[in-house]
Image (cartoon, rainbow, N blue to C red):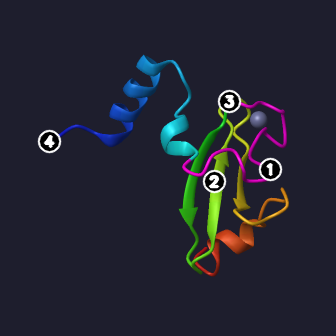
């Protein structure tokens, strides 16, 4: 009950030996731009599907190697969103 979500997910991922595929790629590898890190080219990325405040569906990609972070629209062409588009007027 007091278990923390992040730790549980990490433990499960380590045991499976496979990068979070089941939860990080709910629709399979189909979103342009999310295959490899834009900055360093690493492919072992953390991908999280989420919705922006305006309702747009995006995939948040975080690179553990260089800490590059980008948001890609599901129906985009591999070009990450500008930071302004993500945070809106909230920052
Ligand atoms: Zn990177």
**Mark 3 to mark 1 CA distance (whole Å):** 13 Å
Numbered tag placed on residue 60 in the rendering: 2
Labels 2 & 4 near each other (Cβ < 8 A): no
Please provide percent x and percent y for residue 78.
Answer: 83, 56
Q: Residue drawn 69% across and 44% down?
A: 29
> Residue placed farthest to the left in the image?
1
Q: Is residue 77 left or right of residue 3?
A: right
Task: Tell me the SS state at disc 4.
Answer: loop
Please provide percent x and percent y for residue 3.
Answer: 22, 37
Please provide percent x and percent y for residue 59.
Answer: 64, 56
Q: Residue drawn 39% across and 34% down?
A: 9
The mark that comes first in sequence, 3 or 1, is 1
Numbered tag placed on residue 44 in the rendering: 3
Of tags 1 and 4, which is closer to the observer? Answer: 1
Numbered tag placed on residue 1 in the rendering: 4
The mark that comes first in sequence, 2 or 4, is 4
Few, some or many residues within 10 Å of mark 4 (<14, 14–19, 20+):
few
**Residue identified by numbered label 1:** 33
| For residue 83, above or below residue 48 | below
Quarter of the image with the C terminus in it: bottom right
Few, some or many residues within 10 Å of mark 3 (<14, 14–19, 20+):
some
**Mark 1 to mark 4 CA distance (whole Å):** 37 Å
Q: Is residue 77 left or right of residue 2?
A: right
Labels 3 & 2 near each other (Cβ < 8 A): no
Q: Residue drawn 59% across and 81% down?
A: 54
The mark that comes first in sequence, 1 or 2, is 1
Task: Tell me the SS state at disc 2.
Answer: strand
**Mark 2 to mark 4 CA distance (whole Å):** 28 Å
Of tags 1 and 2, which is closer to the observer? Answer: 1
Task: Tell me the SS state at disc 1.
Answer: loop
The magenta-colored residue range is: 26-44
């Amino acid at each position: 009950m007091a278990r923390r979500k992040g730790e549980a997910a990490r433990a499960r991922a380590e045991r499976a030996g496979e990068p979070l595929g089941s939860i990080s790629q709910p629709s399979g590898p189909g979103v342009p731009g999310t295959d490899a890190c834009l900055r360093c080219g690493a492919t072992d990325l953390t991908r999280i599907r989420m919705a922006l405040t305006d309702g747009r569906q995006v995939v948040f990609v975080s690179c553990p190697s260089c800490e590059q972070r980008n948001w890609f629209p599901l129906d985009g062409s591999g070009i990450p969103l500008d930071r302004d588009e993500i945070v809106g007027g909230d920052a």
